[in-house]
Amino acid sequence: MFSKEEIMTGLDKMIKNPVCELKFETNFQLLVAVVLSAQCTDKRVNMVTDELFKTHNKPEDFVNIPLEELEEKIHSCGFYHNKALAIKSLSYDIIEKFGGEVPGDFDKLTKLRGVGRKTANVVLSEGFKQDAFAVDTHVLKVSNRLGIVKTKNADECEFKLKKFFPKNKWSRLHYQMVLFGRYICKAQKPDCKNCVFNTKCKESRI
Ligand code: SF4
C-alpha cells in the first residue's frame, strides 16, 4: 500500500495543474453543468452548455423554459428527462428557498433534486473554494487501484479518503485523481508505462 505522501508526490509529478474541465461563469452554471455531467463526458457537457448558457443561465430561465424544450437542448448529455426535471426543480427551489443563490452548504445543496454527495462536493470545492472531496468513477477507480480503499461504494470511499489525506489537500487531490483516472489510469487500458506508481502498484499491467 502507498503512503499518503507517496500518492501526493506522485500525483504532483503527473498532474501538475489540476483544474476543473467544465466551463462555467457562476456557481449556478457550475451546478447545472455538474448535474449534466452525470454519466457524460465534460467535453460533451461543455458543448451543450456553450449553447445553453447563451440564453439560459439563471434559475428563473430554467423555471420558465418548457420541460420538452430543455430536454431537447440537453438531449445529447443522456438521461435528459431526469436531468431536465432536476434542473427545473433545483432552479425553483433555489429561488424559493435560497433567494436565488446557490447555497454554499452541503446539507442545503443535497436537498436539491438531482444533487448527491458528489455534485455537492464539486460545487463546494470549485464554486465556494471549500475543502471538499468529491468521489466520481475516476476517483473511486484510482483509490481502489492504489489500495487506499477496497470498495465500490462512493460514499465509503469519500469518508476513507478524507481520513487518509490532509483536509487542505482534498480539493486538489480530487482533481488530480479525476485527471489521472481520465488520462493515465484509464479503466480499460491504463497507461502503466507512464505512471510513477508502476513499480509498486499491484494493478500495474507492465
Ligand atoms: S501502475 Fe497502472 S494501474 Fe497502477 S496506478 Fe499506475 S496506471 Fe493505474
Image (cartoon, rainbow, N blue to C red):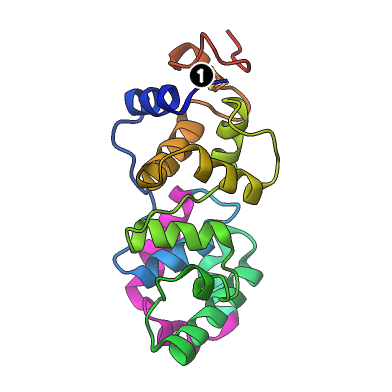
SS label for mark 1: loop
Q: Position of residue 135 (x, y in %)?
A: 55, 48
Q: In the visual, does 131 lie left or right of 109?
A: left
Q: Is residue 56 visible?
A: yes
Q: Position of residue 161 (x, y in %)?
A: 53, 41
Check if residue 44 falls in the magenta segment: yes
Q: Residue furthest bottom?
A: 96
The kind of residue on which mark 1 rests is: Asp
Residue at 41% x, 76% y is: 103
Residue at 36% x, 77% y is: 55
Q: In the visual, does 199 lie left or right of 26?
A: right
Magenta stretch bounds:
42-67
Q: Quadrant of residue 7?
A: top left
Q: Quadrant of the C terminus?
A: top right
Does the beta carbon at disc 1 come under 8 Å from ligand 1? Answer: yes
Residue at 39% x, 56% y is: 125
Q: Position of residue 123 (x, y in %)?
A: 42, 62
Q: Would you place residue 147 above or below residue 200 in this image? A: below
Residue at 54% x, 56% y is: 118
Q: Position of residue 180 (x, y in %)?
A: 45, 31
Q: Would you place residue 176 above or below residue 43 in this image? A: above
In front here: 126 or 130? 130
Q: In the visual, does 130 lie left or right of 180?
A: left
Q: Would you place residue 64 above or below residue 30 in this image? A: below
Label 1 neighbourhood size at 10 Å, few (<14), some (14-19), many (20+)?
some
Check if residue 113 falls in the magenta segment: no
Give the image quadrant in which the ligand numbered 1 is located: top right
Chief secondary structure of the magenta span?
helix
In front here: 73 or 27? 27
Q: Quadrant of the N terminus?
A: top right
Q: Which residue is mark 1?
A: 191
Q: Is residue 65 visible?
A: no
